[in-house]
């Protein structure tokens, strides 16, 4: 879809750009990108599911403050992001969806499970964690927010990029490196700052893990320093019946770095759902 083909959804004080593809024969899957990215993080998965005989409807919004969505000056929180996702579902007349979130997108999935569990059919948690920020991590969020306000998105890209991608990605996939930098550079400063403060202040979700009783797939990057695979495996073990897949030669952005392996894991999970 080009930008002018996107569905436009008004959610309180923001206008959200939403990529919607396919029918709804088997159900809907909603992809939630992380920080500081946009819906194109999922471009391979949106395409890979298209020949599926089950005809899953794929929904990929740009969160407020990202991509082609508007960027309000304030009001960002995990609760607000989750409400935006519910608003998208309501506009599309989707009662329940499989929620697939990466990094901050995973935090939003936890918030949906906390506040809107009836809208979640199943969950895919990619490169994320259940714990709240430590005191050091909170300080890091504040420092990056100040950097964004002082020097803009380019400085944020320079700071983040070395930790986002695996050595193999830097060595063999320059186009992925370029896409990730472009996504960060395209994020407005209010969106950068709003997301950082929302992540800083998010609740801890570890106590929820044992109470999750729906199908869950946990996807980890083997080289991820931000959400290390051992921590994601522990999270999967705390969720009854959760499946765990570790993707080699990928760091924090498995859907872009290793799209075939990530899409295969996702397709297998969706096939099990029927």
Image (cartoon, rainbow, N blue to C red):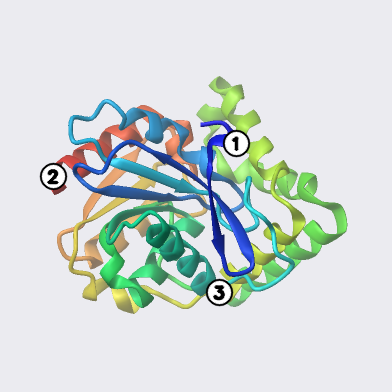
Give the number of the mark in front: 3 or 1. Answer: 1
**Mark sitting on residue 214:** none
- The answer to which of marks 3 and 1 sits earlier in the sequence is 1
Label 2 environment density (alpha carbons within 10 Å; few <14, some 14–19, many ≥20): few
- Residue 22 at x, y percent in the picture: 33, 36
Q: Which of marks 2 and 1 is in front?
A: 1
Q: Is residue 27 visible?
A: yes
Q: Which of marks 2 and 1 is nearer the N terminus?
A: 1
Between 19 and 7, the one lying in front of the other is: 7
Dot 2 corresponds to which residue?
272
Between residue 187 and residue 61, name the one nearer to us.
61
Please say if 13 is above or below 179.
below
Residue 69, relative to residue 57: is it above or below?
A: below
Most foreground residue, 50 or 267: 50
Image point 67% across, 44% down: which residue? 184
Q: Residue at position x 47%, y 57% from top?
A: 105
Question: To which residue does mark 1 refer?
Answer: 4
Q: Where is residue 120 in the image (x, y as percent from the top left)?
A: 28, 63
Determine the secondary structure under disc 2. Answer: helix
Left or right, residue 114 beside residue 75: left
Give the image quarter of residue 212.
bottom left
Query: With respect to residue 220, does 13 lie above or below?
Result: below
| Residue bearing mark 3 | 134
Instruction: State left or right for residue 137 relative to residue 21.
Output: right
Q: Quadrant of the C terminus?
A: top left
Left or right side of 2 for 240: left
Q: Where is residue 115 in the image (x, y as percent from the top left)?
A: 37, 77
């Amino acid at each position: 879809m080009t930008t002018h083909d996107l569905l436009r959804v008004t959610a309180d004080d923001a206008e959200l750009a939403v990529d919607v593809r396919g029918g709804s024969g088997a159900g809907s899957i909603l992809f939630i990108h992380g920080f500081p990215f946009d819906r194109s993080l999922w471009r391979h998965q949106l395409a890979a599911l298209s020949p599926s005989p089950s005809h899953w409807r794929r929904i990929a919004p740009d969160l407020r403050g990202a991509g082609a969505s508007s960027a309000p000056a304030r009001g960002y929180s995990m609760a607000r992001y989750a409400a935006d996702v519910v608003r998208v579902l309501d506009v599309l007349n989707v009662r329940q969806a499989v929620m697939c979130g990466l990094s901050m997108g995973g935090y939003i999935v936890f918030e949906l499970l906390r506040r809107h569990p009836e809208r979640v059919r199943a969950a895919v948690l990619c490169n994320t964690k259940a714990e709240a920020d430590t005191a050091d991590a909170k300080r890091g969020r504040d420092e990056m927010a100040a950097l964004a306000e002082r020097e803009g998105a380019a400085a944020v890209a320079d700071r983040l990029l070395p930790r986002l991608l695996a050595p193999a990605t830097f060595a063999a996939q320059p186009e992925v490196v370029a896409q990730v930098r472009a996504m960060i550079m395209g994020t407005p400063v209010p969106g950068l700052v709003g997301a950082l403060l929302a992540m800083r202040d998010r609740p801890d979700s570890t106590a929820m893990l044992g109470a999750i009783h729906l199908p869950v797939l946990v996807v980890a990057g083997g080289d991820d320093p931000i959400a290390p695979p051992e921590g994601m495996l522990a999270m999967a073990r705390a969720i009854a019946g959760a499946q765990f897949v570790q993707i080699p030669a990928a760091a924090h952005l498995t859907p872009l770095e290793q799209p075939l392996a990530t899409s295969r894991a996702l397709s297998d999970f969706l096939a099990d759902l029927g």
